[in-house]
Every structure is written in structure tokens, then in C-alpha cells.
Amino acid sequence: MNKVTIYDIAKALNTTASTVSRALQDNPRISKKMKARVLALADELNFHPNPVAAHLRTGRSLVIGVIVPRINRNFFASVIGGIEEVAYENGYSVIFSQSNEDYETEKSIAKTFLMKKVDALAVSLSAQTTDYSHFKPFINKGIPIVFFDRVPDSLEVSKVEIDNYTAAYQAVEHFIEQGCKKIFHLAGPLTLSVYRNRLNGYLSAMRDHGLTVEENWIFSNAITLESGTAAVEKMIQINDLPEAILAAGDFSAMGVMMKLKSEGIKIPEQVALIGIANESFSEFVEPQLTTIDLFSHQLGETSAKILIEQLSQEISERKNHHIQFPPKLIIRGSSLKITKIN
Amino acid sequence: MNKVTIYDIAKALNTTASTVSRALQDNPRISKKMKARVLALADELNFHPNPVAAHLRTGRSLVIGVIVPRINRNFFASVIGGIEEVAYENGYSVIFSQSNEDYETEKSIAKTFLMKKVDALAVSLSAQTTDYSHFKPFINKGIPIVFFDRVPDSLEVSKVEIDNYTAAYQAVEHFIEQGCKKIFHLAGPLTLSVYRNRLNGYLSAMRDHGLTVEENWIFSNAITLESGTAAVEKMIQINDLPEAILAAGDFSAMGVMMKLKSEGIKIPEQVALIGIANESFSEFVEPQLTTIDLFSHQLGETSAKILIEQLSQEISERKNHHIQFPPKLIIRGSSLKITKIN
DNA sequence: CTGAAAGCGCTTACAG
DNA sequence: CTGAAAGCGCTTACAG
């Protein structure tokens, strides 16, 4: 219990703290014999160097900070899981905090993490965030920073995401192959480039196939279950149902599905449906939801690897990575009008 | 950028670090005038005391460690979300790690957290853990520790859970009210008291209603989707279907549901079904899944509150809390044989 | 109300 | 290959 320090070990071995410290770090300047003696005694006394003291001295905390909108989403939980795994393997711990989609909270967390001296930072932006200056101090201090999924467009930093433009584009093409022309899009908050890219992919695919998108075909800020339900209500109200709907997230797709079903509208026969995220529930529902995999775990692993690589480099030799995973459309029953499965 | 310290402030104000330190802590021994001057300058210089130095000196890290089997489950993500919220409000940060249901990993994380000097610890045990000695050092050092959901039965510590016995008991009674007598149970890993309690609740309810449970009515170690599917396969194989199934988790209930549906067996008409956890997907599926709410977010909040309370107390005045939330059966379509809704 | 001084437990430049 | 010494940036018992 009474904490053992390197001084206790030094005294017992008739040497100095310097030597003990070096021996524990496997410093080549220490003889094998001395190292063996130090390690043996450290082991016997169950000694572990106090990382806090080391941190104060070296400036390295071995902690990676993570900021997410909320942890209570399979997608974000899974990304954080990936980050934690890689971090742990490399001797780093993960400290995290939730912005709750709130800009002020995000700013305050960034400040806290800066004070707590995280060695590196991984962030997925809140839906409210349009100004990124709260991340500047990290960049200025040479603290590696990586954004994942919800990345800023106007900041020179490392980014890890999927190719959202192509993802939406492919979804629309799949609808078109299934014979759909009147295709609606439930877009997310357009403050975030993720959702702007999905919207653009949708628009381009429609245009490239000679389909004109009407104004009321696009619903904005619709990523919750409720907003999916509300969108369908509105369609029914003005008696304007599409042949297909691409939702910017699985939760709003789920709202769409539940509302359509409760109204007796057949999926995919009357309205085909595609979500984005591949949440676990997407294969539990009926019909199973066609969706786009976001490679959440790999997103996390890759983000952590970038940070850890940069931590091992001199500031001058670091470069920003911009990684885009190719999207993967997972075709299931909700979008198959022609080849019916399920 | 060039870090400001209390010495810089002291020098600029023609006073000493002691005074600056006390002023920043709002120590009553410092004059209001001096406090005002210190705070103004600190603000102007954008100074924040280095918590690492404070930690080395005071021994307080303002970090709470959390160990979960895995983060990639809505239940655990939600608990951690609750812990983080309360921690953040109280100036604490949350560091977490995943045991991946592995005992050795759990031990190793505990050791790491001890070394990293967390101020307090919240744990949900891995399914493999039957020995708790890796938590003893925390208890011995007076580091507050709380277990949630997957709590150890033979350790004098604070525990936060739901009354799992009653939960399962009520589920069985609900089945009986619906006219079921042949009721199967998919139990979880019985190393964990959570699952033993659920099994016991099931057994007691059956016995109290004069129903004899046969050996093959209970499937053990069945909390994954796959094990749910496998259980139904086995029932079909030996041609022995029940009137109702209580699964120890929503994921295995989902496996049961999918398999029954693919076999053309009607839920709840032929087999009624109840899960446990109230995962978000439970209301998305068809029929909607009757389940038991585990109050995940409150579990997290309560766990964090206990820790924070204890951190403010002398070791001698701390006492172990044992909190059991009353269970809440959420009745949906999958269990309603008589009163059909949905 | 304010100050001088020690110390938390390491690491590392400097010296030999 | 080993040691003596300074210092990371705070806090707080002791003194006045």
C-alpha cells in the first residue's frame, strides 16, 4: 500500500534513482546486470512508476481524448470501441465526452481536454458546429487531431470518413435499377459535410440519369425516428408519395418504415427504402432494411492509428491523412422491387 | 502558447505563487482585492492551472475509470453516457476500457487504471469473471468503486442494478396471465448473478404457479442473436415448441423471433416472446418485442453519483450503497396472446 | 492576509 | 556504465 518509489528501489540496491529510472526504461546505458536487479526488485515490490509524475516531467499523458455527439448510438459506440482497442494496445487510454449535439458543450469539452493535457484528440462534430476555432489550440500546440465521420471541410487536419457522395449516388442508382424515378431524400443537418455530401450524391445521380428533382422531394434535418415519421405524414397529407426514399440515416429510415407500415403502404412494392449506417436493427426489421455500411469499427481503428503514428513522429514530419473508405451498399428486402427476396 | 504558470502571474502582480494558488482556489484567507487581481490577470493570460501538477501534489486526478464488457451494446453505451454526464457536471472526466468479456483483459485494465491513478472506478463484470481479487487494491487504497448491472455477489462494495429476480418473475406471470403454461427460458452465462437472478425469478414464478419446469426448458449461456436462433433450431429438431419464451436478453430474443418467423411460426399466437434490456430495436421489429427496461441511463447516473458522493467523504464515513431499481415490464405485441394489440 | 520553503515522483542534461 | 542535481507546476504546513 505505502507507495514504493524509485528511491526505495535505489536505496535497496545501493544505487541512485537515475539508474533505476533508466533501468526501467531499458536504457542501453545501463548494464544488463543492473537492469536485471532493478526489474527483479520492482517486480517483487509490485512497483509501477507513477505516470503522473512522468507526465509532469515529460509532458506526455498517454491519454487520447475523444469527443462524440453522443455515445448512445451504435455507430458512435462502435467507433469509440475501435479507438479504444487500438489505443489500449499501444499503451494509451481513452477519455471521452459527449457534446450532445451542442456547440457550446463541444467547445467546453475541447477546453477541458486541453487542460487535462490529452496527447491527442479524435472528434466527430456536433450538428451545431460551424466554427472550428476551438480546435486551433490543439493544432498550434502540435497535439495530433483527427476527425471522423462528421469532419470539418474548412480545416487542414486528418480526416477519416466514408465516401458519402458515392454512397448516396450508388443508393440512387440502385433505386433506378429497380425501376424507380420519383425518389425522395431525407437529408440530415446540412451544417455537416457528411450530410451535404450525401445530398449532393443524391442530386448528381438523379441529374446524371435525367431525373428532375422537385423541391418537395427533399426533407432537411431529418435523421431522427420522429423526423422520418413526420416526413411520411407530410407526404400523405399532400397526397404525394414517392416510389423510393433514401434516408440519410437508419433511424429516420426506421421512422419512415414504421409510418408506412402503419398506413398499410407496402415496402418495397409501393415505396422502396434505403437507410444509411447499418445499425444492428436494420437486419432485424421486416422487411430488412437496405442500408450503407459506415465501417464504424474500422473508422475508429484507423483514427486511432493515425494519432498514434503522429505521436511517434516529430511535428515537422507529420502530415495530414485524409482517408475515405469506399461505401458499401448492403442490399436487403426494403429496396428490392424487382428481384424480391426475404 | 508558451505556458503560463502561477509564477508568471505572481511575478506580474508582485506577489508569490502561494497567494496566486490560494486566490485561484478562492481560499478565504486571501483578500477580495487580491483575488480579483489574480483572476483578472489569469483570465487575460488565458491561464489554467495544470491539473497534472496538482494531481502529483494532491493525489487527486479528477478521473473516473469505467470498465465494461463492450461499449458496442446500446445498454452499456447508455450506462456510460449516464456516467459521463454526471461526471462532467462535477468536474470529473471518464476514462474507459473494454474487457471484451475476457477475465484476463479485465484484470489488466484494472491494473492500468490503478497505475493511472483514477480517483474512482465503475465496473460491469465480464462473463468470465468469477474471482474479484483484482478489485481489492482499489478497496484497500480507499478508491471508491461501484459495480453496475453485472455485479459481484461476494464482495462488499456498492452495487447498482435492477431487481432481476422480480423482473423475470413478472415476465413469467405475464405469460401465465396470457394463458401460457409451457414456458421456456433462455438464460445468460450463469457465472453472472444478473443471469442467475433472472433464472431464479423464472423458476420461482413457475413453481409458485404450480408449473413444473422440465430440464430441456432451460437453455444456458444464450444471450447472443446466434444462440437464440440455435435454441429454436433445437426445439424444432426435437419437435418440442413452448407456448412462450423468456429470453435473458433482447439479442437472443431477436434470434428467437427471426428463426420462428422464418419457420412460419406465429408470434405471439403460437409462441409468445419476452426479451430483457429494452434495446432500441425492440420497438422497431414486428411484432414489437415485449421486454424489460433496465434503466440504463439512470444506472449510469446513479453509479456516478455514488462515486462522487464518496469522493467528497472521508473514507471512514463512506458506506456501501446497494441500489435495486424496480423492474419495468414493457408490454408489446410479442407477448399478447389474448388482448391482441399492434 | 501574505510569504518562504518543501515536496509530490519522476526524467534527463550534464558530468565523470 | 553510473551519479548528482535540477526541474516539471502545483499545494500546503509552517511561520509571521
Image (cartoon, coloured by chain):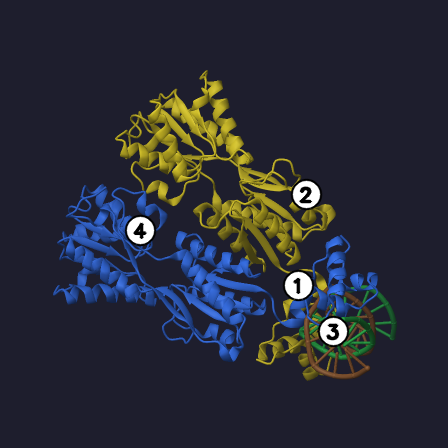
Chain colours: A yellow, B blue, C green, D brown
Secondary element at tag 3:
helix
Label 2 near label 4: C-beta < 8 Å?
no
Q: Nearer the viewer, residue A176 or B10?
A: B10
Where residue A18 is drawn, which disc sits there? 3
> In the rendered structure, which amino acid carries the disc numbered 2?
Lys
Mark 2 lies on residue: A319
CA distance separating discs 4 and 1: 47 Å
CA distance separating discs 4 and 3: 56 Å
For the C terminus of chain B, give its image quadrant: top left
CA distance separating discs 1 and 2: 30 Å
Pointer 3 indicates a residue of which chain? Answer: A
Check chain identity for marks 4 and 1: say if they share one.
yes
> In the rendered structure, which amino acid carries the disc numbered 3?
Ser
Which residue is at 49% across, 52% downward? A81
Secondary element at tag 2:
loop
Pointer 2 indicates a residue of which chain? Answer: A
Of all residues shown, which one is farthest toward the top? Answer: A210
Mark 1 lies on residue: B51
